[in-house]
Amino acid sequence: MFSDLFSKVGTLADHHQFIFAIMVTICIVIASWSIEQILEHYIFPKKKLVGYITAIITAVILLWVIKHFVLHVI
């Protein structure tokens, strides 16, 4: 099941690189915004600066994991 999905995503990435890049960018923005909102609302309700810094660090780690996954796993 997942191998078919990965092959379809790989085919999409090969043939339509611009569309794939837009999709990845939108997913990263949505994920980072969601993490920021969760941190701001639940974990750091009174400390916005700490929440923003934590969201930035989490987003950088998430980008690194995605890069590692794309370069080494797929």
Image (tube, rainbow, N blue to C red):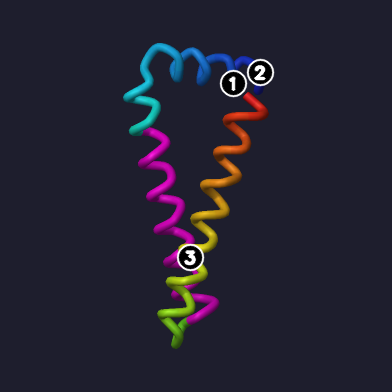
40 in magenta: yes
Three-letter amino acid code of the residue under disc 2:
Ser
Above or below, 56 against 3 in this view is below
Q: Which residue was labeled with disc 3?
A: 55
Q: Which residue was labeled with disc 1?
A: 6
Q: Is residue 9 left or right of residue 24?
A: right
Q: Which residue was labeled with disc 2?
A: 3
Q: Is residue 69 left or right of residue 12?
A: right
Q: Residue at x 51, y 55 (%)?
A: 60
Q: Residue at x 49, y 56 (%)?
A: 59
Of labels 3 and 1, the one closer to you: 3
Three-letter amino acid code of the residue under disc 3:
Ala
Where is residue 69? Give x, y as percent. Answer: 62, 35
* Nearest to N terminus: mark 2 or mark 3: 2
Q: Where does the magenta region start and end?
A: 23-44
Q: Quadrant of the C terminus?
A: top right
Q: Quadrant of the N terminus?
A: top right
Three-letter amino acid code of the residue under disc 1:
Phe
Q: Residues within 10 Å of mark 3 (few under 14, many from 20)?
A: many
Q: Secondary structure at mark 1?
A: helix
Where is residue 62? Give x, y as percent. Answer: 55, 50
